[in-house]
Image: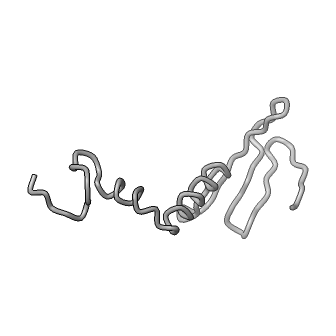
Amino acid sequence: MLYLTRKIGESVIINDNIEVTVVDIRGKSIKLGFTFPSDATVLRREIFERIQEENRAAAVGDDDALAEALKGPGMPAGDPKKDTGT
């Protein structure tokens, strides 16, 4: 891990196209500003980890969760692949 010391208004550049700027410092909290290409993905770590966990669960093939997801709102219970004619 790289550690840097920056003051308010100072930045670091990552891969020539991502800029991280220290915007504010209050006690133990800092506010960062990010400038990055529109095709870049930026997620808080806890959100990233939740997505990874959900992806792993989906890859294992939880058939009950898949059936529930395919059922969708307003659909009858049971096999989501069967047409009940309703």
In front here: 21 or 4? 4
Q: Quadrant of the N terminus?
A: bottom right
Relative to residue 72, is residue 82 depicted above or below?
below
Relative to residue 44, is residue 37 depicted above or below?
below
Image quarter of residue 24: top right
Picture coordinates of residue 21, whole percent (x, y): 75, 49
Q: How many marks?
A: 0
How was the colour assigned to the protein in this rendering?
one colour
Image quarter of residue 66: bottom left
- 43 relative to 20 in the view: left or right: left
Q: Which residue occupies the extreme left position in the image?
A: 85
- 55 relative to 67 in the view: left or right: right
In front here: 49 or 5? 49
Image quarter of residue 14: bottom right
Picture coordinates of residue 83, whole percent (x, y): 15, 61
Residue at x-position 59% and y-position 60%:
52
Picture coordinates of residue 10, whole percent (x, y): 81, 49
Residue at x-position 76% and y-position 62%:
13
